Amino acid sequence: MPTDPVTIWTYDWVPEGPRGFVRDIRLRWACEEADIPYRIATVPFDGRKTNHLDRQPFGQVPMLEDGPISLFESGAGLIHLGSRSEALIPPDEKGRAETIQWIFAGLNTLEMVTMPWVVLQWSKEDMPAITGWLDNRLAQMETVLGPREWLVGDGFTLADLVMADVLRVDLVRKRGDRPASEAYVERMIGRPAFRKAYADQMAHFARADETRKENDDD
Ligand SMILES: N[C@@H](CCC(=O)N[C@@H](CS)C(=O)NCC(=O)O)C(=O)O
């Protein structure tokens, strides 16, 4: 297994709102789970729409670099990291296929509706069709999670990492009474690897506040 550190790219700073949720946390979390060495690199938040289009054609983060491989899309980065460690994707064919299936379910079937719904909440707009779509998906996930501890097999995989990261968004967590989903999110974000990734991301942006303040004072 290669031991050179991978590089996780994120913004140099973000406002307080998204801290703890910037999607570099998915890659940090995966590296922590699998003991994959990594370092953090940044692109400026200011000017983000155009300043790193060579690395990310939509001006977003995160990106992942591993030697000659340079990837955008958190899901692609995760699947790449998964190829390095059985702690992320099980080695058997069935486990691998199901993990990838659930990664897509998290990123597409769930996040495709949670994100627009959250943005509508921020803007205090109501679109009953989107809310109905969200409630249906969350109810379906509640049914899935009711009888199981893990999405794939009998242990943690990237399927859980992605699904928990999508479901842990505050507004989504508060939506409806979904005890199995809430217990699942609690279990996943209680994992030491998540807590480390979260604390490190928060510390990264806190340090950036200091740098910005020093620059403003100059
Ligand atoms: N599908 C992308 C979404 C990336 C994304 O939305 N990134 C956010 C930060 S978590 C971002 O860069 N937002 C700034 C923007 O879209 O301009 C992925 O999973 O990597």
Image (tube, rainbow, N blue to C red):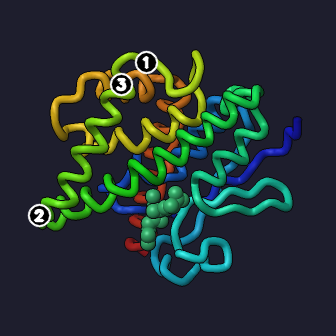
Q: In the rendering, at what x and y percent does residue 213 appear? A: 39, 65
Q: Nearer the viewer, mark 1 or mark 3?
A: 1
Q: Is residue 108 above or below residue 96?
A: below
Decide if residue 143 is on the left or right side of residue 39. Answer: left
Q: Is residue 25 above or below residue 124?
A: above
Query: Is residue 51 in view?
Result: yes
Provide the secondary structure element on which disc 3 rests: helix
> Residue drawn at (66%, 32%), measured in percent from left and top?
88
Q: Amino acid at mark 2?
A: Asp
Q: In the rendering, at what x and y percent does residue 72 appear? A: 63, 63
Residue 148 has which mark? 1
Q: Amino acid at mark 3?
A: Glu
| Marks 2 and 1, how far apart at CA | 33 Å
Residue 157 has which mark? none
Q: In the rendering, at what x and y percent does residue 32 appear? A: 63, 33
| Marks 2 and 3, how far apart at CA | 29 Å
Mark 3 highlights which residue?
A: 186
Mark 2 highlights which residue?
A: 126
